[in-house]
Structures are given as structure tokens and as C-alpha cells.
Image: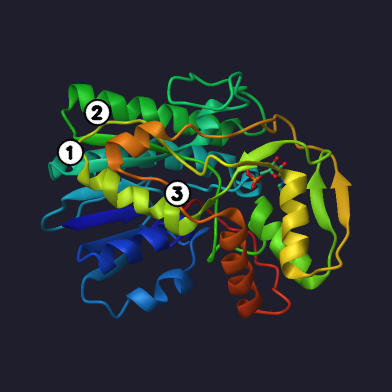
Amino acid sequence: MRVVVSGGSGFLGSHLCEALVRRGDSVHCLDDFSSGRAANIAHLLHEPSFRCTPCDVTEPSRLPGRVDAVVHLASPASPSDYHRHPLPTLAAGSRGTENMLKLAAHHSARFVLASTSAVYGDATGHPQDEEHWGHVNPIGPRSVHDETKRFAETLTTAYRRDERVDTGIVRIFNTYGPRMRPYDGRVVPSFVRQALTGEPLTVFGDGSQTRSFCYVDDLIAGLPAMIDSPAPGPFNLGDPSERTVRELAELVLLLTGSTSEMRFLPLPGDDPVRRCPVVSRAREALGWQPRVPLEEGLRRTIAWFAAQSPHPVREPEPSARS
Ligand code: UDP
């Protein structure tokens, strides 16, 4: 297959490009490198079946030759990134999604939308299955991400109905692993970096809010399965073992052997209280299920972060959308 991956140099995108190249697909990565990093795909550039075009997905894209599938991942995914860049986040989810849908329509290609657990917002039911409609504050601090992904799902569904594009939607829950940026702001890279450098672990609120953390290799295995499937979804992709943020902090301290303290900071606005996916639909439709326990995934992630640099350098702020 020839697969276009928007956001292919990002955390998830680069792992997906690698998995697709490994299974024999030809991969065309599109990225504007705002939150993606060239280093994430440097090892793929010598592969004849991989190419990368710097590209802003909010501009219309035309690609020569055949395209069999388009996977749309391009979007800031970390709360601190989308707080800093609200308009580019909205553009990537709205105009960017439509441009990628048009690209898929032009080539009669399968389109896979990387949606998110954020569509459930601060969910009123628990755990979250795909029947939940979500509970999102449309003007709140997380809304640019949550609402644009909800709109992207609606747009994808309209293109399926009215333009007969073969579409699939996956809702990705919290995922972690190698290639997360140390200053990305999400909880796993923050805690791991802080533990490795002896800084206090910044626990927001009292740390009793929950998330379910999926190791990146597990998550990525669901995406080629969704490309190959004719199913529309939406399917939750995530690890259903729920942990409090405080438990995560304790585990990172244990696994790193760090003597860092925990520093409790105010909880950001609209931070979801509990989040845990029901993944039975993905298991039945895609034969997919996560396998790497949190302790093992964290060990691999810590080893990767430790190998990068003993004193990670703060990155310049991302300047535009990805
Ligand atoms: N969080 C935290 N300390 C941090 C970063 C995040 O306690 O340094 C908390 C955050 O408030 C949330 C959870 O960890 O409850 C997951 O945050 P993340 O930004 O990773 O993802 P999301 O909120 O989008 O699930």
C-alpha cells in the first residue's frame, strides 16, 4: 500500500511510519515540524519506501501517483501546546482534516482519523465506551482540542455519507513512550524528566484524577489494523488499566530510583476527573488489544529518556501547527 501519514514526524506519527515501512508499505509523511521533530524520522530517510514532504495540512495537498490510505494525525496533542497555539490547533482539526479527506476522496483511498479520548471531555459515565456522547465545555481551556476533534469526527462522518469516502475513526487515549518531547508538558514525559534530573514531580491537584496509559507500540498496532479494516468505527484505542496521577508519580519514582519530591500544583481548568477506555469494540473488529503493562512500558520509556541526555535542554516553543 502507499500510505500518507499527516503529522508523520510527531510522537505517534513517527512510530506509525516506522511500523508501516516495516510491514512493506510505501509511506509518505507530511509534516510542518512545528511539534514533530526531524530526529524522529531520521532513521527512516534512507529507506526507499519512505519519503517526507514538509507541508502545512491546512493548505490543500496534491500528491502525484497512487494513494491507498491517508492517516490524519497532524495536530498538537499536548495541553500545553494547544493552549499556546489555539488557532493553529483549530485549523489543523478543521481545515487540515478536510484537506486530508479531500486527498483521500481524490485517490479513492481509505481515510483514518486519529481522534481522541478528549471527545468524551470530563465524561459523565465511566469507563468510556463509544456510545458516550461526551461532556465538553465549548469555551473552556481544553476546548480548542476537544471541540476540533469532535468537529473532525463529524466532518469525517459527512464525507463518508455524502462523498462516499471509505473512512475510519479511532479515539486514542493517553499514550506514552520513546520520542515524547521532554518538555511536551504531558504527564509521563514531565514526570520521567523530572525524576531523572532530581526536580520535583509536578502533580496537578491532589493527583487523584485518573488516566489509563497505553504504551506506544501497543497503540500503534491498532492503526495499520484500522487502515486495513473497512469498519467506520469509532473505536477506542487505549489501555484499560486505570491509575491515579499520584500512583503514576510513585511508580516513576520507584522505577527511576529518584529521590525527587512531589510538588502539588493547582489543577488546570476542566481537567477530566476519570478516564478509562472500554476497548471491546476494537478487540472484536480489529483483533487489537494492549499487551505491555505500565511498569514495563515505563521502564522502556525511562531507558530511552535516560539515553537522550542527562540534562535535557528546554526546547523553543513550537511556532505553528503540526
Ligand atoms: N498532570 C500532572 N502533572 C503534569 C502534567 C499533567 O499532574 O506535569 C496531570 C494532568 O492534570 C492530567 C493528567 O496528568 O490530570 C494527564 O495529563 P496529560 O497532559 O498528560 O494528558 P490529558 O490531560 O490530556 O489526559
Relative vertical location of residue 314 with respect to residue 60 in this rendering, above or below:
below
Quarter of the picture holding the N terminus: bottom left
Relative vertical location of residue 21 with respect to residue 221 in this rendering, above or below:
below
Q: Position of residue 145 (x, y in %)?
A: 54, 36
Q: Quadrant of residue 20?
A: bottom left
Mark 3 = which residue?
290
The answer, for residue 82, to whether it is visible in the render is yes
Circle nearer the viewer, 3 or 2: 3
State if disc 1 and disc 3 touch (CB < 8 Å): no
Give the residue displayed 20% in from the left and 64% down from the top.
26
State if disc 1 and disc 2 touch (CB < 8 Å): yes
C-alpha separation, residue under disc 3 versus residue under disc 2? 30 Å
Please tell me which of labels 3 and 1 falls first in the chain.
Answer: 1
Name the residue nearer the viewer: 297 or 146. 297
How dense is the environment of label 1, judged by Cα within 10 Å: few (below 14), some, or many (20 and up)? Answer: many
Q: Quadrant of residue 304?
A: bottom right
Indicate left or right for 240 with 49 as reference.
right
Please tell me which of labels 2 and 1 falls first in the chain.
Answer: 1
Query: Secondary structure under badge 3?
Result: loop
Mark 2 = which residue?
159
Q: Position of residue 49 (x, y in %)?
A: 21, 71
Ligand 1 within 8 angstroms of badge 1 C-beta? no
Circle nearer the viewer, 3 or 1: 3
| Residue 105 image label | 1
Name the residue nearer the viewer: 159 or 55. 159
Disc 3 marks which amino acid?
Pro
